[in-house]
Image (cartoon, helix red, strand yellow):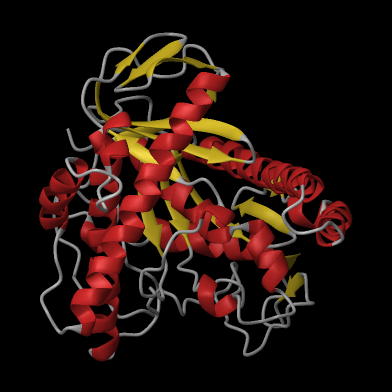
Amino acid sequence: MKSYRTELDLNDRQVTACLQHAGAARWAYNWGLKRKNEARQLKQKYPTAIDFHKELNALKQVSKDAGGVPWMYEVSKCSAQQALRNLDAAFDRFFAYCKAKKAGKKHLRRVGYPKFKSRNRGVGSFTLTGAIHVTERTIQLPRLGVLRLKEHNYFPTGTMITAATVSERAGRWFVAIRTDETQFAGTTGTETLGVDVGIKHLAVLSDGTVFENPRALKQATSRLRMLQKSVSRKVKGSSNRRKAKVRLAHQHYRVSCVRNDAISKATSAIATRARILGIESLNVAGMMKNHCLARSLADASLAEFHRQLEYKVKWAGGIIVKADRWFASSKTCSKCGVVKDTLLLSERVFRCEACGLEIDRDLNAAINLRNMAASSGATACGDSSSGLKVAPRAVQTKLPSMKQEPNTNQLGGCP
């Protein structure tokens, strides 16, 4: 499954229709959450999305004065149905988190109890399925008709589209389609690289290539502060306050675009070069507890960088090798292998007392990650799982299979 996202060019009538669909999805989600909470208080079994679908179909046939929702006929049924499925998925994630936490598992991403969605926190989104057709300049969605796209020739026209999600942000409307495509069979990279991510530099490769961190949030802090003060000084509920909130949202959106643009370009450049790529296993949630670095870490978006890097390398036919979380990539000398006991964050140059090596600490870490990836056995044919979690000084959960090594002249695999 692959998704594409671009901006829509809507007229006033189409914007109104999208707002109606988003409102119907938000109402269905809140209505289903209220019904689940009632069942919880009565200690009854939680109703599922299928149960809600049947009940909602009955409410559509009841007049509004009698507590029905006949206005639901004005929007596509998919918007409310998918919202109820999303509610079920939110509860499944919450219960899975509680079960894992009770079992004593560590390093879990916290998942809270589902909350009600408020219109004040954003318009939201809705998902449509069914007959979806794409052309070079337009997309046709159920009940919404033909919508113009601001970016032409971006969506694939010869693939099967399973769903489309329309969302709003800072007054702009976007559509994301989910397609069912065959695996990309392009040109695989030829290099074995290590990449170290950080705050000073967005990423440093083992060959010395540096991708700079735009620091989008830091650059826009003064303007965001000014716009936020402008919002707080306006009377609540007034038109001026609404306009000030729109200006603030536009600035936040611009910061997000600058950051995402830098990450997307850097990860794409790395994925086209790397056949085997060594990366770290970062505990970003734990790193964010350092309040001195939390804002800079969030601005760098290290987790998003690794997420994009992983799927892009896999799409290009490469292999990702993750180091163990406790692998001392920054403290280890890339020349002699001696591990330092302590290395302060302020020490930007790594100096080895054993061999006298002096090198940038980020470059030193990237070289260690490259050496780890090259020696992990990830190039062996057969089982690839042995190379995904292998690192020096780490306990291997599965021994690599002793099978045929690949032919260096054939990058796609074994001869």
The answer to whether 343 is drawn above or below residue 2 in the figure is below
Which of the two residues, 402 or 210, is positioned nearer the viewer here?
Answer: 210
Residue 24: % across, % down: 36, 43
Q: Position of residue 352 (x, y in %)?
A: 70, 78
Q: Residue at x 15, y 71 (%)?
A: 46
Residue 342: image x %, image y %? 66, 88
Farthest top residue? Answer: 136
Q: Is residue 377 visible?
A: no
Q: Quadrant of residue 90?
A: bottom left
Please state which of residues 371 and 55 is positioned toward the viewer in this rendering: 55
Snapshot quadrant of residue 397: bottom left
The front one of 85 and 319 is 85
Q: Is residue 113 left or right of residue 192?
A: left
Counting the numbered discs, the total is 0
Residue 285, image x and y in percent? 52, 75
Q: Residue furthest front?
A: 65
Q: Residue at x 57, y 56 (%)?
A: 121
Question: At 41% across and 19% down in the image, what residue appears?
Answer: 155
Residue 72 seen by the camera: yes
**What residue appears at the point 72 percent right and 51 percent down from the top-left corner?**
213
- In the image, residue 238 above or below residue 185: below
* Quadrant position of the N terminus in the picture: top left
Q: Is residue 134 left or right of residue 7?
A: left
Is 124 left or right of 83, judged from the image as shown? right
Q: Quadrant of the C terminus?
A: top left
